[in-house]
Amino acid sequence: MTEQLSGPAGRIERLRTLMEERGYDAVVVRDEANLRWLTGARGVFDYTFEFPHAAFITADATYLHTDSRYLNSFRESLGESSPWQLDQEEGTIPDWAAARAAACRCRVVAVEDDMQIGFYRSLERGLEDRSVACSLPLMHGDIQRLRAVKDAAEIALMREAQAITDAAFTHMCSFIKPGQTEKEIRNELERFMFSQGADALAFGSIVASGPNTANPHAVPSDRVVEKGDFVLMDYGAGLGDYRSDMTRTVVLGEPEPWQRDLYDLVRRCHEECAAAVHAGVDGNDIFLLSRRIIADAGFGEYYNHGLGHGVGIDIHEQPNFGRKRGVVPAGAVITIEPGVYLPGRGGVRLEDYGVVTEKGFEPFTASTHELVVIDC
């Protein structure tokens, strides 16, 4: 997270360092989230899985192939000082990449793990047609691991996205009332975020009420919210291709004792886990801590999802607080979101996200951890 590594130039520098370590002469990148991270181009990618772009990166050059639908947008977003050489040559992108490999005399060109098999085979044929002896190893998540450590520019965008998300929670606490449907609450939540400057949703917003709150990924329905209900909102704003992620559970009217107790347990679990986070911790250890706290309270069978995940351009990135072991680095932006879900009654989840530092966990989320009681 040093200043010299902030922004697209620093990200390319980090990738080239890794390329040298791995023995890659070049890499071919097609995933749009990876391309957004490397180029810094904002407002260009539409994430349709059409894969209309490709980057070819060597130790001293950065080439970007696109088509006429995006070329001018790239020029405007990247600016004249950009190191990216834009190209829209006719023909297929695999053949373009093979031509670049031949021109650069590459012998090892790494590709993304999830590259389509058709693209990979076409790239192989393009190299064969040019009589180029070149291996095409998979990167095995190299770029995803680099993306796990956010720089200052990324963190600034995510803080701004979270400010919109926090403002939406404040607004919704005065908007929600009995008689509304989950869909109506969802629609107002999303409308408000766009009115405050969001340019996308982080993901499809979850709004659940009453017994539906026992379903961790409930889809907003036509259920009418009633006095005495928990209402759970899991949502986030998108801004400049980066995302926020937050969950809050509120109650309509004075909570019953079981509701207060359940909320207090989830809050305690959240806060104890957050206090245990620091750079270098194993994510699995934090997950197991959350499991132990909830199990010791007698609710272990009602908490079965991971504790948290990385967030950035994608809503789910590395690292994780989950069942797999893995060190959480300084600069990772990650959620903490324990929950307990009682079938037929209701559930509670409390989620913040923020950056991991050498000293601990610094949340971007500013909304209260107190149980919000909505008068009705």
Image: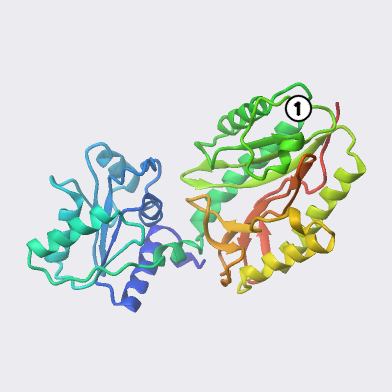
Please indicate, yes or no, whether residue 63 appears anywhere in the rendered image.
no
State the residue at coordinates (31%, 53%).
30
Q: Is residue 228 above or below residue 128?
A: above
Residue 84 occupies which quadrant of the picture? bottom left
Please indicate, yes or no, whether residue 20 appears anywhere in the rendered image.
yes
312, 290: nearer the viewer = 290
State the residue at coordinates (24%, 46%).
66
Q: Is residue 147 above or below residue 78?
A: below
Residue at which label 1 appears: 225
284, 274: nearer the viewer = 284
Q: Position of residue 127 (x, y in %)?
A: 13, 63
Q: Position of residue 261 (x, y in %)?
A: 88, 49
Residue furthest right in the image: 257
Q: Position of residue 197 (x, y in %)?
A: 55, 35
Q: Position of residue 140 (x, y in %)?
A: 39, 68
The 10 Å Cα crowd at callout 1, few under 14, some 14 to 19, many 20 or more, is many
348, 82: nearer the viewer = 348
Three-letter amino acid code of the residue under disc 1: Val
Q: Please state if 100 lies on the left or on the right of 312 as rendered.
A: left
Secondary structure beneath dot 1 equals loop
138, 365: nearer the viewer = 138
State the residue at coordinates (63%, 71%).
358
Q: Please state if 316 lies on the left or on the right of 335 as rendered.
A: left
Q: Please state if 92 lies on the left or on the right of 361 as rendered.
A: left
Name the image quarter holding the C terminus.
top right
